[in-house]
Image (spheres, rainbow, N blue to C red):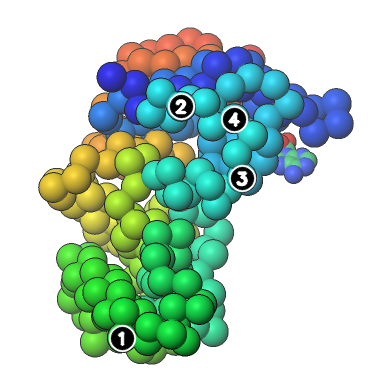
Amino acid sequence: MKVMQTESLTINFGGLKAVDEVDFAIADEVVGLLGPNGSGKTTFLNLVSGIYQPTSGKIIFQQEDITGSGAHVIRGKGIARTFQTNRLCLNLSVIDNMLLGLYSQKESTWWQAILQPKRCRKELRQNIEKCLLLLEHFNPDLVEKAYDPITSIALIDRRRIEIARAIVGDPKLLLLDEPTAGLNSEETTQIINDIGKIRQGDQQICMIIIEHDMNVISSICNRVVVLNAGKKIADDTYQEICKNEQVQTAYLGG
Ligand SMILES: Nc1ncnc2c1ncn2[C@@H]1O[C@H](COP(=O)(O)OP(=O)(O)OP(=O)(O)O)[C@@H](O)[C@H]1O
Ligand SMILES: [Mg+2]
């Protein structure tokens, strides 16, 4: 069954069609999103996560038309993401950054914080526990560093924290925009393992991963979709994508 699908999804920036009538579907699987620089990959994720509103077309998530919904609404419905450039709050601690991932699920209101402080403290304790468990799952050292500022954390651990923050609210669909950018090959292998761990958990999270590293794509993706100049030009297994002439031309030029 399809978890998310787009129908003729399009966005124009002035005269530029950054995403051009893209039909895309994802079930319980990991889909790689490939394409040369500027082909519309990040813009596609920005549309699906509600950061941009489409010029035309539809986004259906778990049978519901979510086209036009804001980013916070879409996050609450179960689509989480990470960004191409790190979006952690640098002056906050590791645990505070993690807690932001649970903000849309927080039940206590400001007036309960005043009138029912015990209830709020209980919710906060439970949320902290959930965040620490997830940090431990990715790297036990991060539990000891939970109250350290992000500025003192190594790049690879910042990536882990971003991914952990995205999944702490139990999304159904996770969008990862170049999770290994800026990492060396050893760190890339570690992040691939971490992404693999997400699929081994109790809850099945499906994923769309934008990635330029073909080792990452071939090792974790069930299927690959290729964009070029905003258009979908291929949708197949990694092996078939490698043989696809249109894809080769898009990457290497005529
Ligand atoms: N907010 C915007 N306003 C105007 N043009 C934009 C905007 N966002 C993206 N674009 C343009 O849309 C096109 C697609 O950009 P996008 O960032 O989606 O590419 P990408 O495939 O993610 O590239 P990369 O691999 O370099 O990250 C580019 O030409 C870009 O300049
Ligand atoms: Mg991009």
| x and y, in percent, of residue 179 in the image | 41, 52
Secondary element under disc 3, as helix, strand or loop, is loop
Label 1 vs label 2, nearer the camera: 1
Residue at 21% from the left image edge and 40% from the top image edge: 204
Instruction: Give me the C-alpha separation between circle 1 and circle 2.
Output: 37 Å
Which numbered disc, 3 or 1, marks the residue that appears first in the sequence?
3
Sooner in the amino-acid sequence: mark 1 or mark 4? 4
Ligand 2 within 8 Å of the CB at mark 1: no
Residue farthest to the front? 115
Q: Nearer the viewer, mark 3 or mark 1?
A: 1
Which picture quadrant has residue 157?
bottom left
Q: Which residue is mark 4?
A: 67
Q: Secondary structure at mark 2?
A: strand
The first of marks 3 and 2 along the sequence is: 2
170 relative to 35, above or below: below
The residue to which callout 3 is attached is 70
Name the kind of residue labelled 4 in the image: Thr
Residue projecting furthest to the top: 245
Residue 117 seen in the current view? yes
Which comes sooner in the sequence, label 1 or label 2? 2
Q: Which mark is residue 64?
A: 2
Counting other residues with Cα less than 10 Å from the Cα at mark 4, is it few (<14), some (14-19), or many (20 or more)?
many
Query: Could you tell me if the residues under marks 1 and 4 are in contact, i.e. CB atoms within 8 Å?
Result: no
Q: Look at mark 1 in the image and give the residue it sits on.
A: 118
10 Å crowding of disc 2: few (<14), some (14-19), many (20+)? few
Q: Amino acid at mark 2?
A: Glu
At 54% across and 84% down in the image, what residue appears? Answer: 91
Residue drawn at point x = 30 percent, y = 37 percent: 206
Describe the element under mark 4 as helix, strand or loop.
loop
Above or below, 132 against 217 in this view is: below
